Image (cartoon, coloured by chain):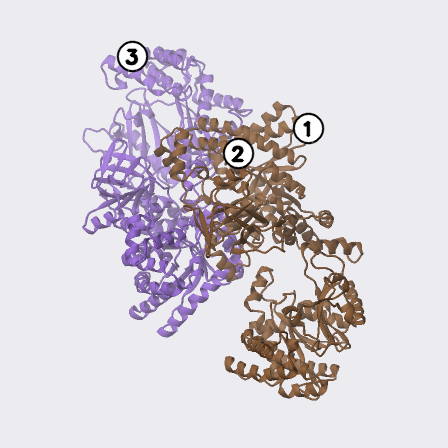
Chain colours: A brown, B purple
Amino acid sequence: MTKYVYFFGKDNCEGSAKMRNLLGGKGANLAEMSNLGIPVPPGFTVTTEACVYYDTHGKQFPDGLKDQVKENLVKLEKAMGMKFNDPSNPLLLSVRSGARVSMPGMMDTVLNLGLNDVVAEGLIKKTGNARFAWDSYRRFIQMFSNVVMDMEGELLEHILEAKKHEKGVKLDTELTADDLKSLVPVFKAKVKEVTGKDFPTDPMEQLWGAIAAVFNSWDNDRAKRYRKMNNIPDDWGTAVNVQAMVFGNMGDDCATGVAFTRNPSTGENKFYGEYLINAQGEDVVAGIRTPQPINIAAKSAPSEVSLEESMPSLYKELVAIYKRLEDHYRDMQDIEFTIQQGKLYMLQTRNGKRTAKAALRIASEMVAEKMIDKETAVTRIAPAQLDQLLHPMFDPKEKKNKIAKGLPASPGAAVGQVVFTAHEAEHLASLGEKVILVRIETSPEDIGGMDAAQGILTARGGMTSHAAVVARGMGKCCVAGCGDISINYKDKQFTAGSVLVKEGDVISLDGSLGEVYLGAVKTIDPELGGHFSEIMQWADSMRTLGVRTNADTPADAKLAREFGAEGIGLCRTEHMFFEGERIKAMREMILADNTEGREKALAKLLPMQKSDFKGIFEAMQGLPVTIRLLDPPLHEFLPHEEDKVVELAQEMKVSVEHLHAKIESLKELNPMLGHRGCRLAVTYPEIARMQGRAIIEAACEVVKEKKLVVLPEIMIPLIGDVKELIMLKKEIIAVADKIISESGIKLDYKVGTMIEIPRAALLADTIAKEAEFFSFGTNDLTQMTFGYSRDDAGVFLPHYVEKRILDDDPFQTLDQNGVGKLVEMGTKLGRSTNPKLKVGICGEHGGDPRSIEFCHRTGLNYVSCSPYRVPIARLAAAHAAIRNKN
Amino acid sequence: MTKYVYFFGKDNCEGSAKMRNLLGGKGANLAEMSNLGIPVPPGFTVTTEACVYYDTHGKQFPDGLKDQVKENLVKLEKAMGMKFNDPSNPLLLSVRSGARVSMPGMMDTVLNLGLNDVVAEGLIKKTGNARFAWDSYRRFIQMFSNVVMDMEGELLEHILEAKKHEKGVKLDTELTADDLKSLVPVFKAKVKEVTGKDFPTDPMEQLWGAIAAVFNSWDNDRAKRYRKMNNIPDDWGTAVNVQAMVFGNMGDDCATGVAFTRNPSTGENKFYGEYLINAQGEDVVAGIRTPQPINIAAKSAPSEVSLEESMPSLYKELVAIYKRLEDHYRDMQDIEFTIQQGKLYMLQTRNGKRTAKAALRIASEMVAEKMIDKETAVTRIAPAQLDQLLHPMFDPKEKKNKIAKGLPASPGAAVGQVVFTAHEAEHLASLGEKVILVRIETSPEDIGGMDAAQGILTARGGMTSHAAVVARGMGKCCVAGCGDISINYKDKQFTAGSVLVKEGDVISLDGSLGEVYLGAVKTIDPELGGHFSEIMQWADSMRTLGVRTNADTPADAKLAREFGAEGIGLCRTEHMFFEGERIKAMREMILADNTEGREKALAKLLPMQKSDFKGIFEAMQGLPVTIRLLDPPLHEFLPHEEDKVVELAQEMKVSVEHLHAKIESLKELNPMLGHRGCRLAVTYPEIARMQGRAIIEAACEVVKEKKLVVLPEIMIPLIGDVKELIMLKKEIIAVADKIISESGIKLDYKVGTMIEIPRAALLADTIAKEAEFFSFGTNDLTQMTFGYSRDDAGVFLPHYVEKRILDDDPFQTLDQNGVGKLVEMGTKLGRSTNPKLKVGICGEHGGDPRSIEFCHRTGLNYVSCSPYRVPIARLAAAHAAIRNKN
C-alpha cells in the first residue's frame, strides 16, 4: 500500500525538508521545523502523489487514503490532547495547499475546519471566549463556502458589511460575540439559497471537502497561468497540509504575523515584518486593519506599536527562531507565525521572494557571513531577474494612468511625444525632443526612427516581431502587439478604449510590463552597485560558455562590452544600409542591370561600410568581431508606397514603370525562403567582394593607425550546401589576402557560416571542412524546422501554447527536442570533421537562460545576445556550468 | 608508373569490354571486337584516367604518357606494316573520343591525321590515287583546323563551296584530284590568316594536338549540357582512341556506313542501316550525298542501290558480324564500318539508342529469343522513356511553326484556341470548343479552367510552379515559365517575338519539349501494345515497392488504376473546395465569426465532400485510399480582385470593408510557413470533424450500398509535434467510431500523418506512437529543409544548378544527402517505436526514377505519384529492386 500521508509533530515526525517533491514545500518545511524542535502545531501532509492520482483518475481519491487520513487524525488528536468533532474538547484544523515550489496565493486554504453549531458551543464552554468562537465559526463558513462550495466570497462579505453598518462600526474586531453569532444562521441560509446545498455540519465531511478543494485548486485558472509563467510542470500536483489550528484571534494575548529574515526589497540584513494583535493570518493580508511593524527599527511613526514593544519576550523568542531558520536553510526566510494566548507557533517557513537588488545583496552578504559559498550565491540569482536592474524604470511610487496593455517586448521605461512615422521621429529627435514611435508594425525602413525614439509601441506583432527584435537589439523599450490601441495614420492619432491620443501628446511605456500610460511618468536610473559586479565576477569565474553580443554599431558594441561581452557574435551589416545616402547607393545597386552597374554602386557603399567597421573594431579591440554578410532579400530596400516610388524613379533617372516592374520582379511569395542570405552573393558575388573588402580594409587600417588588435570573423549566412561556402570563401579570401599582403601588416581573420537552414545542420560534417566557425542562427532554424513563419505564427502560436501543444513559444525558448536536435547534430557532425571548429549561437535564444543551459550542455563555445542581455547570459552560463558539473 | 595507354589489335589486345570505365565505351568495344577476331583496324586507347589527370592539373599530360604513346605507335606501325610520317609507306591515324557512356556527337574527332605535303605525295606514289590523297589531305586540314586550332569550320567550307561553284559541280566527289590539290595551299593560307599560326606539318605535333583537343572537348559547352541532361558526372573524363585509318574514299571498291542490328524506331528485328560508296564516315552524316539503304528490304525506291546488291559478299560478311556482335553483347548494336578496297573493317559497335516503343519490343523479343532473361529485359527500358508513350503526341511528320519555348512542365500534346481566363476556358469548353489556357501564372482559382482546357501555357513559374504541379496531376499538357511570350490581359493577346497571338487564335503545345507552335499540329494517340504490358508485368513481379497514385477525382483514380496504381497515396481535399457552390460554402465558413457559424457552413460542404469520396472509394474499391485533410491557408479561398470582392460581399451580406478587413487579416508574409495544414484543424477542430465525417460516412455508404471493400486512410498534414496528432486523432476517432457503430457495418480505417516538416522527421519516434502510417510530403520537406520557397526559388535555383552548387533541382529529384537524411531518420525512428508503421512518399518525387530508387533503399512501403507517372514508377521500382538485390 502506497503511503500517502506523513505525520509531523514534536515526537513522531515522518518528513523532512528533503521530501519537498512528495510533501510540497510547506509540508516539508513544517516537518523540518518540527524536527528542529521549533514550535509547530502538529498535523499531517497528504502527498503530491495523492493529488496526481486524483487528477489523473477522474477526481477519485486513491485507495487507502481515507484510512491513512483517519489514522493520522487519531495521532493528531493524541498529540494535541483534543478531539475532532468533540464539543467538550474540540480540535479544529487548517487545510492548506503546498506544491513543490511556492505558488503564493494561487491555491486554496480552509481554516477553522471542524466547527458546527454544537462544536461552537463546546468551544465557548472550553475557552470561555464566545466572541472568539463565533468569529472563528463565521470565518469558517465564509472560507469553506467559497473554497469548497464554489460560492462567490462577496456574497457573505456583503452581509458582514451590512452588519457592521447596522452596528455603526468599521472593523470586524468591533463586532461583539452576539453580532457574530447572529451572522452564522444568516450565512448558512445564504449558502443554501445560492448553492442549493446545506452547509455541512459533519466535520469529517468538511475535511474531505476541503482536501478535494485543495486538490482541485491545482487546476484553477490562476494556478495554471502562474505555472505557465514560471515554467512549472502541470503534472506535479500539490500536497495538502492538515494541521491543528492555533488561534491568533482568542484575545489581546494573541497575534499573528508574517516576516522576512532580511529585507526582501533591499536585501538589508534586518528582520522585517508585520503583525496584528487578535487576528487570524488572513487579516494581515486583507488590509482591513493596518498591520503593525514587527520591530522598533521598522517603525515609521511613533503611534505604531511593534511586536518588540507589545510582546518583548515573545519577540525575542521569534528572533531566536528566525535566526535559527535562516542558519538552517542558509537563505533568507519568509515566515508565518501565530501567538495563541502568549505561546508562539510557527506556521510556515520558506525561502523568501525578493527583488533582483535584494537577491544580489543577500547572496553577497551571506558569502561574507560565511553562510554560503560563492557558487551557491551565484545560483541564488535568477538570471531573468537581472533584467529589472539593467534598464531605466518607472519610479514605483508614481501614479500611473494605464490606457492599454500589450506584450512586454523589450524592457525599460520610456516617456515621449507620440509620433507616427520614423521620419517624424528622426526629425523631432534631431531637435532634441523625446518621442515615442507608434506604428501598426515596423519595417526595416523604420530603423532610423526607432533608433531616434525613446521607445516603440506597435499595435501588431509578437515578441519576435520586427519591432521587438530590433528594439531588444537596441536595448530600447518596446511594447508590441498592443491590440488595445487602434491607430489612424491619416488623422495622426490613436485610440485606446475611450482615450484619444494625438500626435504630440505625451505617453509613457513600460517595456517590462507591456503597459502604456497617458502622460509622463517619472523614471529612475538603474543602480548597478558593488553587489552586482561582485556576483557577476564570481559567475564569470564559474562559467565555461563564452558570452558575446549582437551589435551593429560602435555604440552598441561599447555598451555590450561594459556589460561584459567577450566579443561580437553577430554584427548585421544590413542595418547599415538603411541610413541616408546609403540606401540610395543600395537601391542603385539593386536597379543596376549588370555586374558593372552593381559594382559601381557598391563602390559607393564601400567607404561607408568600412568606416562603420572601423568604429566597431575599435570598440571591440582585442576581442573577436563576427560580421555577417548581407542577409535580407533585396526588395526590403525598395519603397512600396507610390509617392516614394515616383520620387525614387526621378532620383535614379528611370521610368516609374521600369521601377514598378523591378519592384514587382523582386516580390516574393515567401520571402523568408527566397532570394536572400548567401544566395544573393552566389548570384551577385560582387556584393561579397565589396563587403569582404570593407571588413579587411577597415581591420588593416585600425591595426595600422591605432595599433590595436583586431579579430574579424566573416560570417556567411543561410548556407545550405558546402559548395556555396566554397565558392564565396574563395571570393572573399582572394580579396582579403590581397589587401593584407599589400598593407604589409599581419592580420588573422576567419571565415565561417551561420547554421540556420536544417540542411546545413544535417550536412554539417561537409560544411565544417570549409568553415572555421559555426554560428547557429536559431531564429531562422526554428522557423524552418517548425515550418513557422515568425511573422505569421502569431495567429496560431498563442493557441498552441494555450493548449499546451507546445510548452513554450519556440522563438523565445529554444525547442530542445526538435531544433535542439539539429543544433546537437550540427555541432557533433561539424566537430567530427573539424575538431577546432568554434561553435556559437546568435539567435534570440542566446539571451534566454534555459536555452543557454542547453547550449552549455551541447558544448557550444559561446552564446551571443543583445547588449542588455549580456549579464543575464553570463549568469545563466554560470548556472548551467554549476548545475551540470557532475 | 601508371599505365595510360592500352593497345588493341588482332594479336596483342590489352583491353576488353569490361574495361569501359578506363577505356571508354568505344575503346573497350574496339578491344572486345579485336578479341573476338572481328576485323578492326588496330590502334591504342589513351585512358580516361589520363584525361582526368589532364583536367585536374591545368591541362598537363601525366608523366609517362608521351613515352607510352610513342611505344604504342611503334607497335601500331608494326601491326600495320606502315610508318607514321614515312612518305614511302605512310600510316595515317584517326583520333576519336570515347567516354564511359556514349555521348554521340558531343566531343571531337580528327581523321586522316599524319598528312603533310611530303606524306601526301608519298601517299599518291604508294596508292597511285592522287584524288584520294588530296581529298584526305583537304579533309584533314578542315577537321584539324576546326577541332584543334579552334577555327570556324564554315571558313574553309566556303572555300570548298566556291571551288565547286567555279567548277560548276555540286558534289565533293565531282571535284578532281587537281581541284582538291589546289585547295590545300588556299586552306593553309586561310588558317594562317585566321589563327595567326602555321598549319603544323609535323605529324607528332598533329597527334598531340589532336589528343589534347579530344581531352578539351570533354569540357565544351555542348558536352557539359549533355552530361547535365543525362546525369553523367563531370569528373569521368573521356578516353582517346588512336587508330590506323582505313579509307572508304579510295574508289568505288570502297564504302562506309552505319547500321543498327534492329530497327531503333520500331524495334523490329531487321538489320537496318545506310552506307555510301567512296566516302568517309562523316559524309554519311553530313547529308550532302544521300546515303543508300543497306539492304534490299529497306529500299524505298527501285533507284536506290543497297549494299546487299552492290557488294553482296561483303554484305553477307557484315551480316555475319552484326549477328555475332548482337549475340555477344545480347543487345541491339549500333555499328560503323568501312570498306577499303574490298575489305571490311568494323570501326565501332555500341548498344544502340532507341525509342521507348523500340526498347519495349526489342527487350520483349530478345526474351522470346532466349538472348536475355526477363530481369535484363526490364532493366533495358529507361523509366523516364515511358513518358513518351503515355501521352498523345504530335505526329513527328508534321511541319511545325515554333514561336516560343518554355519549360516542358507536363508532357503531352495539346491544340486549341487561346483563352486568357479560367472562366473563358470553362465557358468555351462547355460549348465543346478546345482551348489552351494562357496565363502569366496560375492560382488555385484557375483549377476549373485548367481542367477544362486542353493544355496550359504560363509565362512565369518553374517545373514545380502551381501550373506545372496541377497539370501533371491532371495529366494535362503544360508549358510553363515561357519567358518568350509577353501577355497582355487587357487586350487579350500575347506576343512571342514578332508574332502576335490573339484570343481565339489556335496554337499547339508540346509539353514534352516545352514548345509552342502557331496553328494546329496533328496529334497521334499513344499505342500501349502488348510489349508494354508484358514488360510491366515482369517489372511488377520484380519490385517490392508499392506504387500508388495522387488523385483527387474519381476520373483520375480510374485512370491511375488502369495504369496499375495500387491505391491512392494522396487525395487532396482542397481541390474539391474550389468548384461552383462549394467555394461559396467554404467562404461562408471562413467569414464566420464563431464555431457555430463555421459548423453551419461546413454542414453545407459535407454532402459534397461525401459524394466525391464515394466516387473515389468506388473507383479504388479493394485498395487503400489516403485522404489528406484540408491543407492550404484559408486566404487562398478568398478573391483578391476588387470586383470579385464586391460581388462576394453582396453574396455574403457583409460590408465590403468588413470583407476587406477579413482578407487583410488572413494575409501572410510567408503563407508557406503560416496558418495551414493541421494548424487550421487545431484552431478550428470543426473542420477536421466535418472531413472525418464525410470520409467515414462515404465509406460506410459504399460498403453498404455497393458491397465493396473500402480502405480509407485519413492523413493529417503538416504535423510538427505529436500533440497535434493526438488532439486531432481524438476528434476524428470520436466522429468515425460513432458513425461506424451506428451504421452497423465493419470498417477498418487508419489515421496517419504527412511527414513534411523537418521537426516531424526529427521527432518521428514520438509521432509514430500515435500514427498508423507516415507519408513523406517531400515537396514541403524540401522547401523547409533547404529553406527554398518553390514559388520563389526560380530566381536563383537555375543559377545553382548551372554553377553545379546543386547537382539537380531538388524539387524534381530528391536531395538524398539532406532531405533524404530526414526521410531515413524519419523512417527509422518511426519504425523504432511502431514496427508496423506503413511508410510512403507522396511528393512530386514519388514519380522520379532516381528518387524512387532512394525510396526502395530506404525501405519505404510505397511511392505515390500522378496517374501518368504510375507506369514509370512501377518500372523504376523494379529497377531499384534489381539493382539493390545484392
Q: Secondary structure at mark 1?
A: loop
Residue type pointed to by label 1: Lys
Query: Dot 2: within a 10 Å radius of its alpha carbon, few (fewer than 14), some, or many (20 or more) residues?
Result: some
Residue at 38%, 48% in the rendered image: B378
Chain identity of mark 2: A
Query: Dot 1: within a 10 Å radius of its alpha carbon, few (fewer than 14), some, or many (20 or more) residues?
Result: few
Nearest the viewer among B756 and B650 is: B650
Q: Above or below — where is B309 with respect to B569?
A: above
**Is there any visible trace of residue B882 in the rendered image?**
no
Question: How far is disc 3 from disc 1 in space, using C-alphas?
Answer: 80 Å
* Image position of B815 (left or right of B492): right
Residue A575 place in picture, x, y as percent? 53, 38
Residue B18, disc: none
Nearest the viewer among B176 and A632 is: A632
Residue B536 place in picture, x, y as percent? 34, 51
Question: How far is disc 3 from disc 2 in space, using C-alphas?
Answer: 58 Å
Look at mark 3 in the image and give the residue it sits on.
B179
Mark 1 against mark 2, which lies toward the viewer?
1
Chain identity of mark 3: B
Look at mark 1 in the image and give the residue it sits on.
A707
Q: Secondary structure at mark 2?
A: helix
Look at mark 2 in the image and give the residue it sits on.
A728
Residue type pointed to by label 2: Leu
Q: Above or below — where is A407 with respect to A211?
A: above
Nearest the viewer among A645 and A686 is: A645
Residue type pointed to by label 3: Asp
Residues tagged by mark 3 and mark 2 found on one chain of the structure: no
